[in-house]
Image: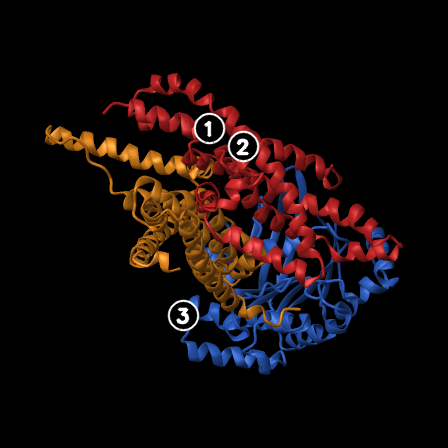
Chain colours: A blue, B red, C orange
């Protein structure tokens, strides 16, 4: 399988704070990777570097054959192929659901409105809320908003989807409706990188689990290995805390 | 035409002769305005329509009309009535100084009561509920929770209002008072050097604004010391 | 109100003058506000410094002083320019209408600078990131994400600035423009009913500011319609 994301000796600083330390990670097309670790471990920073919402300070990031540098054109090429879902949804509040979904296809892919709307409705159906197309984000529940955000990213027909703690801002009863959509997406063969604490999702969907702590990748294992016998002490402690409740 | 820098230097001390009156107007009107504002605020926050309604009308009138017009109504307008001229207030109302103080105080009171109301409404409802749950009386909740937090929330807007008051004192020059702008206008009438004189006056006002803002920043820092990050 | 008979048409024309000053000053203020805000947000240190000086001076100096400076200052400047060509000219002034409109426009423009700047920065960072993640270009983010929301964020302050402009028009009577306060002064010198006359002026202004308040309220309701179901 071809490698779609390659991170090599990547470092990231915030001032003097060393946020990511020599991160090496390769993700193949079609792979589903779950990134977990305690808060402040650098997991969000790492996936935000993959579409250059954060700039790395040293090392290499290659996405779909394009190396990320200051070159704006390449950044745009990468962002077109990489969809992202945020913890706080970040839907545009002044646009309807349909307008949120068609904005980028129209502006970036230069798609005609009718075509963009047809695609938007297809993905809204897939995330199971086609009936909400003409509402504004504030009229939807959190779970519905996050599903709209997933559909918005899918409308660009990306090669890879990044999820940055997609269920952390949701009420418990809404988490499963979002995870179900993500599980469907995984079954269809989408390449996914998910930062999440949902260990049930990780166990059933992930090909590999990346455990991070203090800016480093501590361990990379299959879910079976990771949950049965974590290699590192830090991962054991983390699992103990997160599975305790 | 020539621009004479030395004229600015010469006129500064002359204009500063009006500084005392400017500060006097500012201080006296700010004080009266604040007292009045608290009264209007209490009326506005009460649950009685016959108190709320006049407070609203007061705020509506004084915020909806120009201060200059209010000043003219008081200074030029009130003497139209015989009963005013015969009243005990006449010794005050015929003085341009007191007319300016009255106009400035009445005007600022309308704004300040709304600023304070914004502060009161901004206090987190949860804190007031916590006070209730702890068994504090209504008076205790108001004096220990609502008022201190409301004042902190209102401080930035209040400092803007003081700056705005300082600028408004310049209007007293239209009713013959010789505060800084009045002095500057007199000098301009003599020298006909408007740029130099008015710029000199502007410099003094800007320094005063700076002092007011710096002072309020210090007060705000002190008042918000409980949220300061270490 | 029969004592005011014969003066209503003067008040009417005075009001037309007020409205003209209001609209011209509003256009100038919006232009200055947009320029000032772009300068404050620009990468150029010089532009930022100029914009900073502009807002400090025009928000700190009394409105009356700025107005007098403009009116008398421009008169001196214009006179000396014209005298250079034709020494026989004694005095030329910038018409009070323009001196007043420009002065008020510049003053309120300084406040609008801060309002527009705040509205630009007030759009949630997460949305900007989402737009970047969708690979929208910088100008597209401005046009489709920032601008439509800036309007909503700026509206309440913008309304207050419009009220300021309306009330500041009263100052223009001091430099001799025949607006309603000036009309009242003229009428008073003949019929000696100062309270009635100045109160009439106050009520006309109250009507104008009420109209502005309602108009802004209506615009705000429209701008916030997507938040209807907000929970």
| Along the viewing direction, whichever of C3 and C209 lies nearer the viewer | C3
Q: Which residue is mark 1?
A: B179
**Residue B140 x, y percent position in the rendering:** 83, 49
Q: Residue at x 63, y 46 (%)?
A: B37
Q: Secondary structure at mark 1?
A: loop
Q: Which numbered disc flags the more N-terminal residue, 1 or 2?
A: 2
Q: CA distance from mark 1 to mark 2?
A: 9 Å
Asked if residue C85 is positioned above or below residue A26 in the image, the reply reads above
Distance from the alpha carbon under mark 1 to that under mark 3 = 65 Å
Whether residue B93 is visible, yes or no, is: yes
Which mark's residue is nearer the viewer, 1 or 3? 1
Which residue matches tag 3? A110
Is label 3 or label 2 in front? 2
**How much space separates mark 3 and mark 2, taking CA atoms?**
64 Å
**What residue do we see at 65% from left, 62% from top?**
A88
What percent of the width, then of the height, locates residue C30?
A: 39, 51
Q: Which residue is mark 2?
A: B25
Between B27 and B82, the residue placed more toward the observer is B82
In this picture, is C114 found above or below C158? above
Identify the chain of the residue marked 1, using the numbered disc in the image.
Answer: B
């Amino acid at each position: 399988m071809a490698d779609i994301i390659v991170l090599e000796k990547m470092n990231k600083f915030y001032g003097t704070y060393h946020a990511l330390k020599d991160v090496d990670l390769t993700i193949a097309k079609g792979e589903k990777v779950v990134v977990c670790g305690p808060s402040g471990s650098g997991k969000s920073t790492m996936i935000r570097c993959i579409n250059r919402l954060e700039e790395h300070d040293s090392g290499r990031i290659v996405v779909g054959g394009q190396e990320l540098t200051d070159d704006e054109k390449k950044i745009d090429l990468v962002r077109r192929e990489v969809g992202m879902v945020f913890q706080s949804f970040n839907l545009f509040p002044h646009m309807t659901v349909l307008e949120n979904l068609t904005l980028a296809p129209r502006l970036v892919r230069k798609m005609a409105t009718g075509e963009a709307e047809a695609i938007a409705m297809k993905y809204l159906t897939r995330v199971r809320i086609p009936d909400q197309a003409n509402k504004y984000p504030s009229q939807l529940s959190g779970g519905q908003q996050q599903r709209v955000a997933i559909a918005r990213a899918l409308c660009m027909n990306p090669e890879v989807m990044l999820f940055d703690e997609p269920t952390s801002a949701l009420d418990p009863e809404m988490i499963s409706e979002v995870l179900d959509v993500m599980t469907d997406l995984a079954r269809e063969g989408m390449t996914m990188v998910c930062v999440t604490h949902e260990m049930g999702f990780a166990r059933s969907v992930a090909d590999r689990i990346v455990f991070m702590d203090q800016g480093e990748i501590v361990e990379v294992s299959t879910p079976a290995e990771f949950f049965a016998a974590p290699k590192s002490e830090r991962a054991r402690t983390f699992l103990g805390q997160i599975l305790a409740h | 035409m020539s621009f004479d820098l030395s004229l600015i230097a010469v006129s500064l001390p002359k204009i500063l002769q009006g500084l005392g009156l400017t500060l006097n107007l500012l201080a006296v009107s700010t004080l009266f305005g604040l007292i009045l504002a608290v009264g209007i605020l209490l009326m506005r926050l009460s649950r009685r329509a016959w108190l709320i309604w006049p407070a609203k009308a007061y705020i509506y009138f004084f915020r909806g009309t120009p201060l200059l017009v209010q000043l003219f109504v008081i200074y030029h307008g009130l003497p139209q009535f015989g009963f005013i001229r015969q009243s005990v207030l006449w010794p005050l109302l015929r003085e341009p100084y007191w007319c300016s103080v009255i106009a400035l105080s009445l005007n600022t009171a309308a704004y300040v009561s709304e600023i304070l109301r914004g502060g009161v409404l901004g206090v987190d409802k949860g804190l007031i509920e916590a006070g209730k749950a702890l068994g504090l009386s209504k008076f205790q909740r108001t004096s220990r929770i609502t008022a201190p937090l409301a004042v902190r929330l209102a401080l930035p807007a209040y400092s803007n209002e003081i700056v705005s008051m300082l600028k408004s004192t310049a209007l007293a020059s239209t009713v013959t008072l010789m505060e800084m702008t009045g002095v500057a206008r007199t000098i301009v009438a003599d020298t006909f050097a408007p740029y130099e004189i008015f710029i000199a006056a502007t410099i003094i006002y800007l320094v005063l604004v700076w002092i007011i803002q710096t002072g309020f920043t210090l007060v705000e820092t002190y008042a918000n010391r409980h949220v300061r990050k270490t | 109100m029969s004592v005011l008979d014969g003066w209503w048409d003067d008040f009417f024309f005075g009001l037309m003058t007020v409205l003209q000053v209001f609209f011209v000053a509003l256009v100038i203020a919006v232009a200055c506000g947009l320029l000032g805000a772009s300068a404050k947000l620009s990468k150029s240190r010089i532009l930022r410094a100029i914009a900073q000086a502009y807002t400090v001076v025009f928000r700190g100096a009394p409105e009356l002083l700025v107005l007098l400076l403009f009116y008398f200052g421009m008169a001196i400047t214009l006179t000396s320019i014209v005298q250079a060509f034709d020494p026989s000219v004694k005095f030329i002034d910038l018409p009070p209408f323009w001196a007043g409109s420009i002065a008020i426009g510049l003053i309120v423009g300084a406040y609008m600078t801060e309002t527009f700047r705040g509205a630009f920065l007030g759009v949630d960072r997460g949305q900007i990131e989402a737009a970047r993640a969708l690979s929208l270009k910088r100008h597209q983010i401005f046009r489709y994400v920032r601008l439509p929301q800036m309007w909503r964020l700026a509206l309440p302050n913008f309304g207050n600035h419009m009220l300021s402009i309306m009330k500041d028009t009263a100052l223009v009577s001091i430099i001799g423009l025949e607006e309603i306060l000036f009309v009242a002064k003229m009428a008073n010198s003949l019929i000696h009913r100062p309270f009635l006359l100045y109160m009439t002026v106050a009520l006309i202004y109250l009507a104008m500011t009420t109209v502005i308040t309602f108009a802004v309220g209506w615009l705000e309701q429209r701008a916030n319609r997507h938040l209807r179901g907000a929970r």
